[in-house]
Amino acid sequence: MNALTGEKVAIVSPKPQTTRNRIAGVVEVAAKKGQHPAAQIVFVDTPGVHKPGTQLDRRMLQEVYEALETRDLVLVLMDATRRVQLAEADDQEEEKKRDVWTSEDEFLFGLIRKLDCPVFLLLTKIDLVSKDRLLPLIEQLTRQYEFAQVIPISARKRDGLDLLMRRIVDVLPIGERYFPKDQYTDQPQRFMVAELIRESILTETGEEVPYASAVVIETYEEPEIRPESAKKKKSAAPVRLPLTRIAAAIYCERDGQKAILIGRAGSKLKEIGTTARRKIESLLGTRVYLELHVIVEPNWRESKVFVEQLDWRNQLERIAMTQVTERPDLGEVEAGGEVAGE
Ligand SMILES: Nc1nc2c(ncn2[C@@H]2O[C@H](COP(=O)(O)OP(=O)(O)OP(=O)(O)O)[C@@H](O)[C@H]2O)c(=O)[nH]1
Ligand SMILES: [Mg+2]
């Protein structure tokens, strides 16, 4: 979705189950004479389909079902590299993995068989797989379901993306735009900020810490001067960009995880904060003061109420209802915030 929109709509990491909520990425396609009219494609990225264990998993699967309620077309993305590895592996460990996969596949195919819209299979990361390995894989998968299209793609090399867009436009109904022409996502910026912090946790910590972590923005104070007007100001002195002040809580499940997230003398939290702040600055076009603190919420992934509260759509509702203008009590601050150049 990032490759297609040309924007960082969704966070990305090598770890599975990175995406937790459904999010839209909007792509405008220009008309092509004799081929197709102009189009707006609204991609809805969802968490991956896997059998749920925790309440968080159940919520993630619910996101998939909710995304399926409003769709004209479904794209099933499968990582070609992992598929090829499994198809060719023959040791016992791999055998076990294959069993898990078979049951996850059944789950997925069961889900798409209920759909009354076209389903495309996209084999991803083909920059890492040779063509002669791809063909048997396609054969094997199309035996299980009659996909309307099978399109091998590489987001990295942009292979297959133009073809994909054409095939999508072919099946879309004629209708009004869903989003204004220049809007590329449905997520409010404060939630994209929370995601960028989570992305930094995914890359900066290992083991179960990223899975047990959740980020909630507690204060979000936008500058009064918009960055555009600040840039336009005619002045000989270098323009100092306005400042956005953000405080966020990182929730984890256990004291040990909190200790890892904070690190020796707060070093890990500082690292997470610095990488996140850079990404947030490039998203917002302002300087950013980012303050992070860590809260232990035992077994939050098993709490339906907590998991529901994390959903940005629910958070938006709550913000709209309470219209809190006061800075909430942030409790114990574990490490100071920081800002570029200060
Ligand atoms: N080589 C290669 N790597 C890719 C390509 N597309 C994605 N990746 C890598 O694959 C990993 C997973 O990418 P994500 O976008 O997080 O995958 P996802 O399907 O959204 O996964 P979840 O959100 O965890 O369900 C990242 O390390 C990406 O850099 C590609 O076309 N080629
Ligand atoms: Mg994802």
Image (cartoon, grey):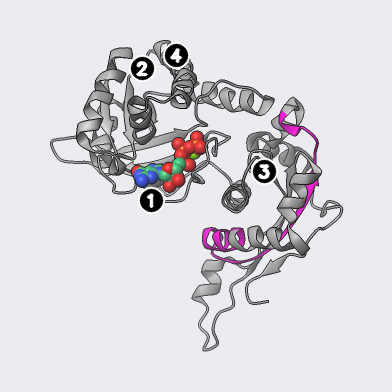
Mark 4–mark 2 Cα distance, whole angstroms, equals: 19 Å
Mark 3, residue position: 209
Mark 2 or mark 1: whose residue is earlier in sequence? 1
* Residue 341 part of the magenta-drawn span: no
Q: Are the residues at dot 4 and dot 3 in contact (C-beta closer than 8 Å)? A: no
For the magenta stretch, what is the residue range?
276-301
Residue 222 vertical position relative to residue 111 in the rendered view, above or below: below
| Pointer 1 local density, CA inside 10 Å: few below 14, some 14–19, many at least 20 | few
Q: Amino acid at mark 3?
A: Val
Q: Amino acid at mark 4?
A: Glu
Mark 4, residue position: 106
Mark 4–mark 1 Cα distance, whole angstroms, equals: 33 Å
Mark 2, residue position: 117
| Left or right: 150, with 61 as reference point | left
Residue 151 vertical position relative to residue 290 in the rendered view, above or below: above
Q: Which mark is residue 6?
A: 1
User: Which residue is at a point 48% across and 15% down the rendered structure image?
Assistant: 103
Mark 3 or 1, closer to the camera: 3
Q: Position of residue 190 (x, y in %)?
A: 63, 50
Mark 2 or mark 3: whose residue is earlier in sequence? 2
Of residues 47 and 308, the one nearer the viewer is 47
Of residues 120 and 200, the one nearer the viewer is 200
Q: Are the residues at dot 4 and dot 2 in contact (C-beta closer than 8 Å)? A: no
